[in-house]
Structure formats: C-alpha cells, structure tokens
C-alpha cells in the first residue's frame, strides 16, 4: 500500500471542501431564485359566502419564494376580442415586495349596473395591494375558471396564466381548458375574454 503524503492529503481535503462549498452556494442560489404559485381552494363555507355577493368569479393563489435584486413580478390582464389580443389591463411592474410566504393574490370579476348600463368590475389582488378597472359588458352568458390546478414553479420570462373569464352573446359557450398555467385552449371563438397572468422577469427600472 502506497502512503499518501500530507501535502497530497491536504490538497484532497481542500478540494473536497471547495466542492462542498460550491454545491452549497449553488443550492442557496437556486432556493433564493425559486418562485412558486399554488391555487387556493375555498372551503364550502367560503363558497357559500361568495354566492351571497355580486362577485361572479374569484380565484385565489399563494405566492412563495423571493425576488432577487434586478428581478420583478409583473401582473396584468390580457383582453381578447373574437380570439385576438386587444390589449392589456391592470398592468403592474416594479413589485415592492421581495419575500413571499403564502402571500395571497387573486382575480375577481363582479357584474353591476349603473344608469341602465351593465359593467364588469375587474379586480386583481396583488402582493402589495390591488388594482381595479371597469369594462362595459354586453355579454349575455359567461364562463370562468382557474387555469392552474397544482403548484407551479415560475420560469424567467415565461408567462403563467392564472385565471380566465369569457363571455358571449350567442347561445353557446365552449369550455376553456389549460395545461396548468399554459395559454388556454378554446380562446379562438370567444367574443370577449380576460386572462389574468404573471411573469417573473427583469426589473425594467434597473435595466
């Protein structure tokens, strides 16, 4: 058996320690960068309480993780008319909150009438507050659903679609489906639709 010199042994130990430290630092960086969104399922009591209001739809989600310096969470509501993107509403950026521990976000739509005109009230619940807008509503039937069904990890610059509302003036309305946060299927024939989405991206204020 060939003896191992002390200098060689010391080099092996130092190399091993450096490798362990590198792995630990890599793991910390990955954990720091990780952001997840999980759907919140309302209880029967909560659903019963919601049914006593004028809110047509509301979906809740948990956000967990942290934002690194130079990164941002951007929320918005995409509006579609006859299957085509017609604009974005309630767009936010430069999120001031950087750490999320079961932080609630939501998307709600409420129907109401004013001076014999019908409107939709869109409310986006954000980590640091909420954003609200109104839109004239001529739809006679509608459908809505959450678009994520289990925890999903955000990928940089990849939109995650959280919730959708769609309306029509026709006699039928096809169901909308999604593969856990992907852009939903069945949007091409929707007269009017709103998609609530989030994107983990670079902070434009630091670019």
Image (cartoon, rainbow, N blue to C red):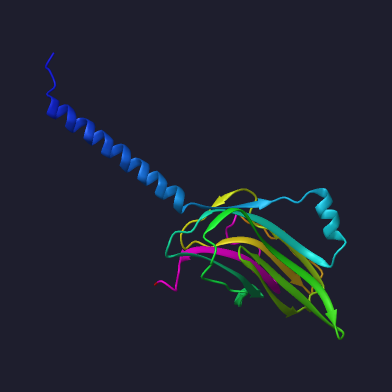
Q: Looking at the image, can residue 185 be seen?
A: no
Q: Is residue 50 left or right of residue 153?
A: right
Q: Looking at the image, can residue 84 be seen?
A: yes
Please name whichever residue, 36 or 120, is drawn nearer the observer in this view of the structure.
36
Please name whichever residue, 183 or 90, is drawn nearer the observer in this view of the structure.
90
User: Please, is residue 202 above or below residue 177 in the view?
Assistant: below
Q: Residue at x 86, y 54 (%)?
A: 48
Provide residue 31's location: percent of width, then percent of height.
Answer: 46, 48
- Quarter of the image where the N terminus is located: top left
Magenta stretch containing residue 102, yes or no? no
Q: Residue at x 45, y 53 (%)?
A: 33
Q: Residue at x 62, y 74 (%)?
A: 90
Magenta stretch containing residue 183, yes or no? yes
- Quarter of the image where the C terminus is located: bottom left
Task: Residue lying at the far bottom in this picture: please name it.
Answer: 115
Provide residue 93's location: percent of width, then percent of height.
Answer: 53, 71
Provide residue 88's location: percent of width, then percent of height.
Answer: 60, 76
Give the magenta-colored segment's residue range.
180-206
Q: Residue at x 79, y 75 (%)?
A: 139
Number of marks present in the image shown: 0
Q: Is residue 120 left or right of residue 124?
A: right
Provide residue 43's location: percent of width, then percent of height.
Answer: 79, 48
């Amino acid at each position: 058996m060939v003896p191992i010199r002390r200098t060689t042994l010391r080099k092996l130990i130092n190399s091993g320690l450096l490798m362990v430290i590198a792995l630990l630092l890599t793991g910390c960086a990955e954990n720091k960068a990780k952001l997840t969104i999980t759907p919140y399922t309302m209880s029967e009591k909560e659903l019963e309480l919601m049914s006593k209001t004028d809110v047509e739809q509301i979906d809740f989600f948990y956000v967990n993780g942290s934002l690194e310096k130079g990164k941002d969470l951007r929320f918005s509501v995409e509006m579609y008319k006859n299957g085509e993107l017609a604009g974005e509403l309630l767009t936010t950026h430069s999120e001031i909150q950087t750490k999320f521990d079961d932080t609630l976000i939501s998307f709600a739509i409420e129907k109401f009438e004013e001076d014999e005109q019908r409107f939709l009230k869109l409310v986006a619940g954000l980590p640091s507050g909420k954003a609200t807008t109104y839109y004239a509503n001529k739809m006679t039937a509608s459908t809505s659903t959450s678009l994520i069904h289990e925890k999903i990890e955000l990928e940089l610059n990849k939109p995650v679609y959280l919730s959708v509302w769609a309306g029509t003036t026709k006699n039928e309305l096809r169901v909308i489906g999604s593969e856990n946060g992907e852009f939903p299927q069945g949007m091409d024939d929707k007269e009017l639709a709103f998609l609530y989405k989030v994107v983990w991206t670079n902070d434009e204020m630091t670019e």
